[in-house]
Amino acid sequence: MALMTHVQEVKSAYATINIFQNPDTGITIYEVGGCHQSSADSNGVSLASYIHAIFSLLTQANAHNVLIIGCGGGTLGIMLARARCKATFVDIDPTSFVLARQYFGLPEATACHVADGEQYLRDETDRYDAIVLDAFHGENIPAHLQTPEFFGLVRERLKPAGVVLANIRVGHDFDKGADRVAQSMRSVWTEVRVLDAEGVCGRNAIVMAGKVERLREPRLLQPPNTNALLMRLELERLRFRPWSVSRWAF
């Protein structure tokens, strides 16, 4: 990674957020607790391969109206807006929206709601083509956003042909976090798939359900102006794999 300059530290009620930028390349990083929650080029295009994977899957699913639970730097919403799709963000921390607009270029027209993701689904009645779960406390998704009850709410807010995509941090091949989320989804949907890059430590897997049977491995559709080759190589590692919480002995 190029030399970064610390631009701002913001202490919200939920986290200490640090913004870093490279003055030469325009690369911007949104960091919480030492973890990069978002990174983007000078145009707000993500430098995280999992965001490009989700964007490609949403494109395949013809998702034009997308609810995103968890904002960070808002890069997925920026890319969706560029593709003339409607993105709606929900995040419990309003600071995320301010920083996403100030440093990453999240459009002012993008709807942003301050709320817990589960409570938002209980209170609202809109239905979406897709719902993306990308909400983290540290490196973990809050437990209440991984339950069968939560995914039951998600299904109620999806259109009949809708899909749900969840970004899951995976430490190693014996980490069953993605498989446990898949099991929760399986209690609600018949078709559940896991997209993963087995053999890579500290990676992101995508667990999906709904009308996902025809989705293919993702391609790079909005190349960033830096690190595009790396994005392509990381996307090429992703494969759909069988899942089971008992696939490992421990």
Image: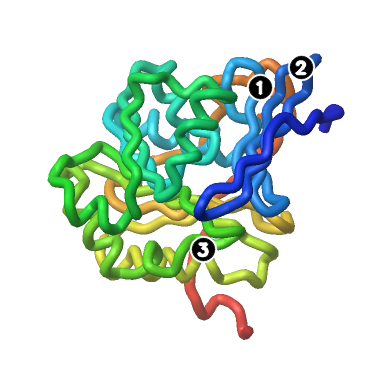
From this view, report whether residue 101 is shown above or below residue 32: above
First-in-chain label (3 vs 2) = 2
Answer few, some or many: residues within 10 Å of disc 2's Cα (few below 14, many 20 plus, some between 14 and 19). Answer: some
Q: Position of residue 6 (x, y in %)?
A: 77, 33
Q: How is the image coloured?
A: rainbow
Q: Nearer the viewer, residue 47 or 184?
A: 47
Quadrant of the drawing holding the C terminus: bottom right
Check contact, mark 1 vs mark 2: CB within 8 A: yes
Which residue does the image show at 46% across and 70% down from the upper left? 180
Alpha carbons under labels 1 and 3: distance apart: 28 Å
Reading the image, the residue beneath label 3 is 178
Reading the image, the residue beneath label 2 is 25
Q: Amino acid at mark 3?
A: Ala
Q: Nearer the viewer, residue 189 or 20?
A: 20
Alpha carbons under labels 1 and 2: distance apart: 8 Å
Reading the image, the residue beneath label 1 is 41
Q: Position of residue 23 (x, y in %)?
A: 78, 17
Which residue does the image show at 16% across and 40% down from the upper left? 126
Q: Position of residue 197 (x, y in %)?
A: 64, 51
In this rendering, position of residue 188 left or right of residue 47: left
Q: Amino acid at mark 1?
A: Asp
Quadrant of the drawing holding the N terminus: top right
Mark 3, mark 2: which one is toward the viewer? 2
Residue most extreme to the left: 125
First-in-chain label (1 vs 3) = 1
Check contact, mark 3 vs mark 2: CB within 8 A: no
Q: Position of residue 11 (x, y in %)?
A: 60, 47
